[in-house]
Image (cartoon, rainbow, N blue to C red):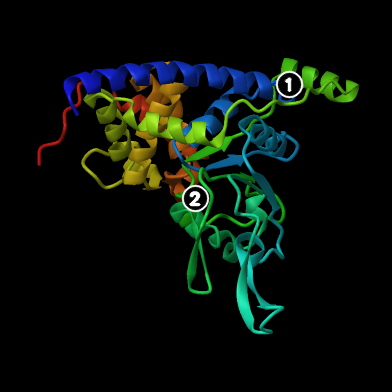
Amino acid sequence: MTIEQTIEREQGDVAAVLRCQVSYHRICEELNKVIVGQSEVIEQVLITMLSGGHALLEGVPGLAKTLLVSSLAESLHLTFRRIQFTPDLMPSDVTGTEVIQEDPDTRQRGYRFLPGPIFANLLLADEINRTPPKTQAAMLEAMQERQISAGGERHRLPSPFFVLATQNPLDQEGTYPLPEAQLDRFLLHIKVGYPSGSDEWEIARRVTSGQLGSIEPCMSGDEILELQELVKRVPVSDQVLGYAWALVRASRPGTDEAPDFVNQWVSWGAGPRGLITLILCAKSRAALHGRHHATVSDVEAVAKPALRHRIAGNYAAQAKRLNSEALIEMLLDAVPSDKRYEPPAV
């Protein structure tokens, strides 16, 4: 690529980032017709989609998690399917199954694959932790490889493909913990909290008076794919990459970089996928806010949803009631953001 072509491409990327910011505000405006507040949750979900990953939304029942995902699908003009996960749900109910079909002309019988509801651009896996691990594991290949294997054949999923799963807190009745391998497939673990007092007032006013608007689509699947490629080209300085690298390295007990509290209270820390997630999501957040470069502030903003399911406290931490959220806050305090980071020597 010549210098002129490089300059032209960079100018085009800067313009594309500004269009991304405009689209982000349009999507937020559409979602605000039916969703009150939750701006941080909406931002994190869109960061997940621009990064090409999947998200796990956790919160108590009744916080509009399902409504948020279905409304987002309307605003993005994507094919949308919803699976209600229950204790008796089978893997074939998610991925699809093979059935025997008879040819009306030759009378010969053969197997034909019937796609399951997972064959959609946006899949809402509702209350995913209410189904046993066997069915949860059926989604691993789809989430990682974007394909389904059945009858010795591979079936590609549509592109783009996102899984937005909701789960209730694990201490509630009838829940199964997600396997660690599946948790790591989720790019972000997003916490959905109770609304503020003013937001809850507005929710009650709108719902009881029927003042919910209709959502208009404002972004297509092709545009999302283009933005995903744009995010990959957003530059990241060694300073930003080094800060994310230092956070991940410091989260691992028994290493030279680990602070004392990590060795004392952490069972295991984030792996390389955690570092990749921090960088990708920081770049996506920068693009959503109209910036053609990621900053340390972007890394700090996505640190909790990116790492809360990748850092596990031990029994000593549980005894002190220190969850992954508290451990990440301690990490952010312990790792200096203004330090000059250099690539490690080989």
Q: Considering only vertical position in the picture, is 66 above or below 129? A: above
**Extreme residue toward the right, this view:** 209
- Badge nearest the viewer, 2 or 1: 1
Residue shown at 27% from the left, 29% from the top: 241
Q: Is residue 287 left or right of residue 75?
A: left
CA gap between label 2 and label 1 equals 32 Å
Q: Is residue 211 left or right of residue 60?
A: right
Residue shown at 74% from the left, 25% from the top: 34
Helix, strand or loop under label 1: loop
Q: Quadrant of residue 71?
A: top right
Specify the quadrant that holds the N terminus: top left
In this view, the residue in front, 338 or 149, is: 149
Specify the quadrant that holds the C terminus: top left
Q: Position of residue 270 (x, y in %)?
A: 36, 44
Q: Considering only vertical position in the picture, is 261 above or below 297? A: below
**Extreme residue toward the left, this view:** 346
Question: Can residue 252 be spotted in the picture?
Answer: yes
Q: Position of residue 158 (x, y in %)?
A: 54, 49
Mark 2 touches mark 1? (CB < 8 Å): no
Q: Considering only vertical position in the picture, is 273 above or below 279? A: below
Q: Amino acid at mark 2?
A: Leu
Q: Position of residue 110 (x, y in %)?
A: 61, 80
Residue shown at 31% from the left, 31% from the top: 244
Residue indicated by mark 1? 33
Q: Position of residue 250 (x, y in %)?
A: 30, 37
Specify the label residue 183 is tagged with.
Answer: 2
In this view, the residue in front, 302 or 332, is: 302
